[in-house]
Amino acid sequence: MIHVTKALARRWLEALLHVNDTPERTAAAFALGCFIGFSPFLGLHTVIALTIAFIFDLNRVAALLGVYSNLPWIIGGYYVFTTMLGAAITQVRLPPDFEHRLVALFQLSLRSNEFWNQLATLLRPLLMPYMVGSLIGCTIIGAVAYPIALAFVRRRRGLPMITHHGPPRHPGESRSSP
């Protein structure tokens, strides 16, 4: 299984690195995917990323790689942490009996309407902290992902690490030229 995952990741990386897009656009697509992948819109990440990548004609593979960087073994911890952050910011406190009600909830059948109604009632106060915390988290992750992806793509393509400050220079023009 791990061999298949490595082979799949390698193929995706090769597709990502052998496109005609500039490294900046490829990195932007990846950062956008990371932003969306860690956003609070669970279940819609792929559709949102592909839609935005299509609208802005960004690399869809890079956007999907960013979305799928929110791996199953980190997703739970990430959303718990960002919801706690959001709760601290919005000053929302859990009811004192939250843990007891959560444990009691799982005495019910997952197939019953009562389970889902009680779950919605229990989690409703956490909706705003979840949204606020997740949006802060995905913004930070997207902002960090761009320069890392840009450096990675440039290094893999053998391009120099150049940062442009102002309009591009013409060949033969010195740095000190106005």
Image (tube, rainbow, N blue to C red):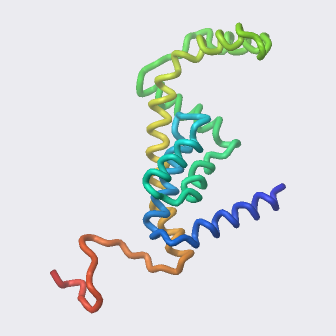
Residue 43 pos. (x, y %)? 61, 35
Determine whether, in the image, residue 176 is placed left or right of residue 66. left
Task: Assign the N terminus to one quadrant of the image.
Answer: bottom right
Residue 104 pos. (x, y %)? 73, 10
Determine whether, in the image, residue 113 is placed left or right of residue 4. left
Residue 88 pos. (x, y %)? 45, 26
Above or below, 81 against 142 in this view is above
Determine whether, in the image, residue 3 is placed left or right of residue 158. right
131 or 20: nearer the viewer: 20
Count of marks placed on residues: 0
* Residue in the image at 47% along x and 48% along y: 52
* Quadrant of the rendered image containing residue 112: top right
* Residue in the image at 50% along x and 73% along y: 154
* Residue in the image at 80% along x and 13% along y: 109
* Quadrant of the rendered image containing residue 45: top right
Above or below, 164 against 96 in this view is below
Residue 3 pos. (x, y %)? 82, 61
Determine whether, in the image, residue 159 is placed left or right of residue 171. right
* Residue in the image at 69% along x and 42% along y: 72
Q: Which residue occupies the extreme left position in the image? A: 178
Task: Assign the C terminus to one quadrant of the image.
Answer: bottom left
Q: Which residue occupies the extreme right position in the image? A: 1
Above or below, 2 against 47 in this view is below
Above or below, 119 against 5 in this view is above
